[in-house]
Image (spheres, rainbow, N blue to C red):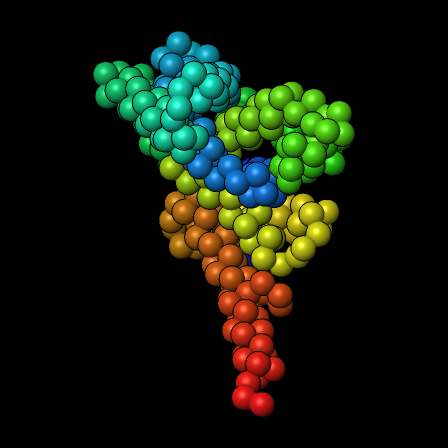
Amino acid sequence: MISDLLIPLQYDYMLRAIWVSTLIGGVCGFLSSFVTMKGWSLMGDALSHAVVPGVALAYLFGLPFALGAFVAGLLAAGTMAFVKTQSRLREDATMGIVFTTYFALGLLLISIFPAGVDRKTIIFGNILGISDSDILQVVAISVVALVVLGLKWRDLMLFCFDPNQARTLGLPVRRLHLLLLALLSAVTVAALQAVGAVLVVAMLITPGATAFLLTDRFGRMLWISSLLGAVTSMTGAYSSYYVNGSTGGCIVTLQTLVFLVAFIFAPKHGMLAAKRRARQTAQLDGPV
């Protein structure tokens, strides 16, 4: 039995996939708390699709995968900010227009140059075949993101909760806004390796949303979210060997199952707890 469970660990490509997925999952989980509190779920979705043309161009010109994706992500974030400040459009409409435009441009490039671009890797990721150079990029992005988040998490927390109060206290709100966007773009690039452009948004939102149901303290939320991201990514990559399925699909499905458990059974903010409180309130307000 134990020897069967150790089979995936005998293959070098599985070991690489497991530890790289664990690293990416932990970083995404850390950032996920800020994305959840800021209400930037659509922004994460927008950036994950907007990096596709950058990745396609990087393939065509033989440039690093991460460089093209990061530049495209920053350009998309800048385009959204420009359109928002120069028009009366609501933020969700601005994001929708920009990310679909970038995604369409990426698909157009892929369809025009099908031989030069690996569309399956972009859309679904390829953590099992990740190269040494891509691993170095992922590690560098993850380390920088963790260091910056670790040093600035209190300022970013206040910015996410209440930008007006952060401005009143003298914090550079505009720089914090740009910093969070840059981190989101960079971590999106790293996560693309694991789950691809279609599912990366789940890794940036689900761990934070799950942690939000489990605690009222932001410090604990950061730890819970990071741990959930790392453990579910590690387990998802490991279990993909046995189900012979997509690694990204296994990771995101597992994260969704954990979210559903928290959604139903969370001690204070779960569905059952809400019903219990409603019954207690009804008994207290009953006929006298």
Q: Is residue 243 above or below residue 266?
A: above
Q: Measuring from the top left, give residue 199's x and y in whole percent.
A: 41, 40
- Extreme residue in the front direction: 288
**Could you tell me residue 112's position as x and y percent?**
23, 16
Q: Residue at x 73, y 29 (%)?
A: 168
Q: In this view, does 68 lie to the left or right of 213?
A: left
The relative height of residue 268 versus residue 53 in the rendered view (above or below) is below
Q: Which residue is drawn at 73% across and 26% down?
A: 171
Judging depth in this view, the residue of 73 and 162 nearest the camera is 162
Residue at position x 62%, y 21% from top? 174
Question: In which image quadrant can residue 151 be found?
Answer: top right
Residue farthest to the bottom? 288
Looking at the picture, tell me which residue is in the foreground, 162 or 191.
162
Along the line of sight, which residue is nearer the eye, 11 or 267?
267
Res. 268 in view? yes
**Residue 15 horizontal/vertical position (percent):** 56, 42
Q: Residue 126: tell me if it is visible.
A: no
